[in-house]
Amino acid sequence: MQDPHTAVALFGAAGYTGLELVKLLSRHPRVRLACAASDGHAGRPVGELTGQPAGGLAFTSTDEARAIAAGCGVALLAVPPEPARLLAPPLRAAGARVIDLSHAHRADAEAVYGLTSLFAGEIARARLVANPGCYATAVITAAAPLVRHALVAGDLVVSAGSGVTGAGRAADEAMSLGEMYGEVRAYKVLRHQHVPEIEATLARVAGRERAPAPPVILTTHLLPVARGIFATLTARLARPLSSAELTARYREDYADDPTVSIAPTPEEVSLRRVVGTNTCRIGVASDDRGVVVVAAALDNLLKGAAGQAVENLNTMLGLPRTSGLEHLARHA
Amino acid sequence: MQDPHTAVALFGAAGYTGLELVKLLSRHPRVRLACAASDGHAGRPVGELTGQPAGGLAFTSTDEARAIAAGCGVALLAVPPEPARLLAPPLRAAGARVIDLSHAHRADAEAVYGLTSLFAGEIARARLVANPGCYATAVITAAAPLVRHALVAGDLVVSAGSGVTGAGRAADEAMSLGEMYGEVRAYKVLRHQHVPEIEATLARVAGRERAPAPPVILTTHLLPVARGIFATLTARLARPLSSAELTARYREDYADDPTVSIAPTPEEVSLRRVVGTNTCRIGVASDDRGVVVVAAALDNLLKGAAGQAVENLNTMLGLPRTSGLEHLARHA
Amino acid sequence: MQDPHTAVALFGAAGYTGLELVKLLSRHPRVRLACAASDGHAGRPVGELTGQPAGGLAFTSTDEARAIAAGCGVALLAVPPEPARLLAPPLRAAGARVIDLSHAHRADAEAVYGLTSLFAGEIARARLVANPGCYATAVITAAAPLVRHALVAGDLVVSAGSGVTGAGRAADEAMSLGEMYGEVRAYKVLRHQHVPEIEATLARVAGRERAPAPPVILTTHLLPVARGIFATLTARLARPLSSAELTARYREDYADDPTVSIAPTPEEVSLRRVVGTNTCRIGVASDDRGVVVVAAALDNLLKGAAGQAVENLNTMLGLPRTSGLEHLARHA
Amino acid sequence: MQDPHTAVALFGAAGYTGLELVKLLSRHPRVRLACAASDGHAGRPVGELTGQPAGGLAFTSTDEARAIAAGCGVALLAVPPEPARLLAPPLRAAGARVIDLSHAHRADAEAVYGLTSLFAGEIARARLVANPGCYATAVITAAAPLVRHALVAGDLVVSAGSGVTGAGRAADEAMSLGEMYGEVRAYKVLRHQHVPEIEATLARVAGRERAPAPPVILTTHLLPVARGIFATLTARLARPLSSAELTARYREDYADDPTVSIAPTPEEVSLRRVVGTNTCRIGVASDDRGVVVVAAALDNLLKGAAGQAVENLNTMLGLPRTSGLEHLARHA
């Protein structure tokens, strides 16, 4: 009898996103986590870092994991861009399909952009998937209905903030609680690396016959929380639509998407309520000047990284999109 | 064919603990949540407050729930002590077994004290279970091995702190983030209501032939976090034991308990790591003066309330103790 | 010999802003705090709430304070708009000049808008000063150089967030730490009451011969901190200016302003660093698309309320603008 | 005419405590900050780090500062113990009196223990002052009246927590907001380095003819706040005293101390209210079992370090003890 589980190899397993993947894949009904690589923690039981049993799995070195991955169906790369660039080719050559969570392959023509809500068909057949950036997931998901229906006139102005885990796990004085307590500050102003992938993806959403996708002006902020992204989008409408009409349009567009939840108003989008879940929560409103505001929130490590990667994994394996994600709920 | 699910009625469903119970019971494999009572939210879909689908369930009034509960196997009371005192008798008369999460029945001779780690046998047969207080769960679980083996000489001094959800959901200026940001303060000094249940339970743990249970001196503090209890116990040892010997004793005593995790040292007990789980994490150490220090942490709304109640429910129904709790993991 | 101190009466002394005023006026070198009114705390020593001696001053009732205020040079109203509307006329009739910190008189033609950075001349002669809203102070101060030099083409999009003390001191479940921990959410989307005063003031800054002031699109957010406002302004430049040119323009415009500090870049504007001070910190940058982003931060209770009121008081009394404010520094 | 200012040299000026000293000494009425040494920031204006003007002062290298210090009346060492051990002898040889804020000289017979509340007389004449540890200041100040009046029978059990700035400014993953958000954990259990200085100092307070000082059992915790120490002391009373009698005793003992504030009850000791001030706030209560609980709170960087050092500096210079500290007040 055939094993109904697909073997999956994980690289970068001890980072914030890596640990989320370990926790998700350990209980996934159709996946077997074959190895969890972390050179800094090799040999240590995975459960010591996740705080929960992981079937006795221990971290392996990257080299060991490469050998194991050769026999796996899929390899997930939760490592920085440089190692991701080096790991992907040999893993693919060895037969594994690759999901890269770094930005190494997001502008790569060979890779499929892994925003499952938009590109599930291509992802299902992909050999290499570039998992989107966390800000990109929030902004594209929040903007897609406006862009798809050619509703934006002029710029799309985005102000977004992230918890400090968005910067990855690292020893950095600037991220210490002593420095971040009560802090808010902007970073990478007018030069955030997610803007190109947002603009390119929105251009695909806009399509050929419609108005071109709007220029995206993104300001990112560091917020004094551990997890979560909150994005506020502002634009002029190309034609007048009421808040109710806009909300109805969003509800329709995302009717079949189990990972997007449309709130009655932007005020009902709560960062706290999405942390710990794989949901992107969105609310939209307009005024009589023709201004539209969209609020969107998601967990940067789940819907913005590890959860999205599992959606892609499921899609690649022909499984229901939220397999292994249904148990997620806010309990904290 | 018989329905494999037991119908359960929940009262006080919109409080912090009530909402945790809704989320847990909605996905419990052997339980059907027959009603979720909240007079303040009657008619409103439960999912609006939990932020997740609950099978279309809506809150009912207490009166409606009482009628429904008559046909249920178990009723859970997540209400304040006064309503709990009024609700329990008619529910029991109507045939339901009752788990009361308030302190109304904790000193009641008719009720079984619902600390599943210690009293599973009695709980299995109980008609009325008094779910322990959150501090009591932390302190008793942390102290039981010391008391069972008559290791404490003199007082058991406990300093413990709780997140603000421990005080329940309420409009209270003192609990506002404006007042609590960066705040720590002691409350109910030398007069916390959980001390009698802690002392009475430790006396049972001590047993007849052994040294009497130690006096418990508890100081509780409000901490600037949403969830969790951290307790530090200090005592003089009745006879010398090393940190390693003490840790081994704790590991042995809790070897079969799926809800207690013994850390190698007290320093490895992390509040953050237990929030969102049904685990009580404990570490113990001693020095050459014969002093013992035990650190314990748990999620006040799960292991300290709703999770403990589900353990009791499972035990009463003859189910595995952690049914419906296995999916809990720190994702936040 | 004449008393060199001006007697000042304070109404609404026990609110967040009121207490800041008590602390500031108690040590002001040229002011004598004649009374501090709070009906809820009448008779109680002021020091119990401020945590520091206030010369033995006790809170009085509003009625007592009205009698005392008749002999005072200035009355400060740190009360809600309704009481402010009722208190101002009799106080003025009794001879006191009035500074109203509520929004009651901000659209009142008789009142001078109390943004000292812009309108010191009028304030010096005013009998009634309407102290600006905290968001308005941040946005107008950050936008004034752009508007004065006619640099904005199109909308001025503002995304701003405030700590919970911005909502005033009140028992409100939504503001509890249990609800606000890790939370970010938008509020009053497309309908914030400060927009009219911002637009009206920027129109005055724009002046007659120049381009009209830009439409202001403001989205306000609640942030999980106690104090502070952080505002991010985004616009298209009417003509190209580099970040360095813009920063130089801001430095020049605010060269003589002791309460505004221009950062080298927007990234160096830190909310944490302005809390506890009377400084508005601002940074500006542009890109080669002609987009300008301005970041601004201030303490909502000091520069955004009580500190601004003391600036106005000093200006009305012919004192140096920062008398009684020089000691403020970040020590927390 | 003689300069009424004493020149002071500061080493370690860019750490958390060093920056507090820069801010305090810059506005001290009788002190001139002659140099502020930080090898990591040499040449950079001090105001860039403090966020406020410091008379144009720039950081110098340690070597430059050593030369300048030779002409100074007092040198303050806000550096780690090793550099402090190396710097003190040459500075003293060059004629400067030294206040060492590290623990290098706390057990040194040549140094005076700089707890101004207890040892002002010796400090006035000292050439070398060892500024106390932050926990030591809290615990000794809170315990002194009990020990002085021989009121403790048996152990003094202390549970104390500190904000993360207590660990100094450093790049440390464990201190990142991502790790510390919602976290509480114990550290250095049964082996904290402040216990010897606490026990030695309490032995001096106990005096010869009285009962010996009690053994101190200290458990320290890391709290998810930036600043402050909260300590809870528990003991058995040697003879019965009511809460009111104990509070009266504390009030009497600290009647002349401008830096200690006795609260009516332990519940009224608030961490938040002391942060930003040079006050140690203390409350005491007992019960009919003869148990006494003392709660104490202070700002670890002010009363627990920099403020205490200024008290010592003033005492050494014959100035009023709180010169340069009166302006401190909670504004945050």
Image (spheres, coloured by chain):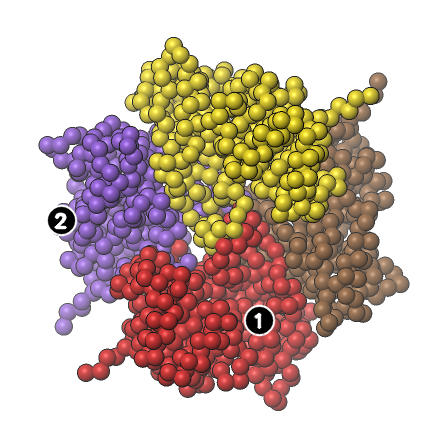
Chain colours: A red, B purple, C brown, D yellow
Apparent side of residue B272 relative to residue B246 in the rendered image (left or right): right
> What is the secondary structure assignment of the residue under circle 1?
loop
The subunit carrying tag 1 is A
User: In the image shown, does C64 or B246 lie closer to the viewer?
Assistant: B246
Q: Front-most of C60 and D222? A: D222
Please state the horizontal and vertical placement of residue B227, each as a whole percent of the image. 40, 49
Rendered image: mark on residue B121: 2
CB within 8 Å, label 1 to label 2: no
Q: Quadrant of residue C126?
A: top right
Query: Could you tell me the amino acid type at mark 2?
Result: Gly
Compared with C229, A275 (above or below) is below
| Residue sitting at x 57%, y 25% | D128
Question: Which residue is the extreme one toward the top?
Answer: D209
Q: Which mark is residue A194?
A: 1
Residue mark closest to the camera, 1 vs 2:
1
Q: Position of residue A259 (x, y in %)?
A: 43, 72
State whether residue D12 is above or below residue B20: above
- Depth order, front residue of D28/C157: D28
Q: Position of residue C174 (x, y in %)?
A: 49, 51
Task: Name the side, left or right, on which D176 lies relative to C53.
Answer: left
Disc 2 chain ID: B
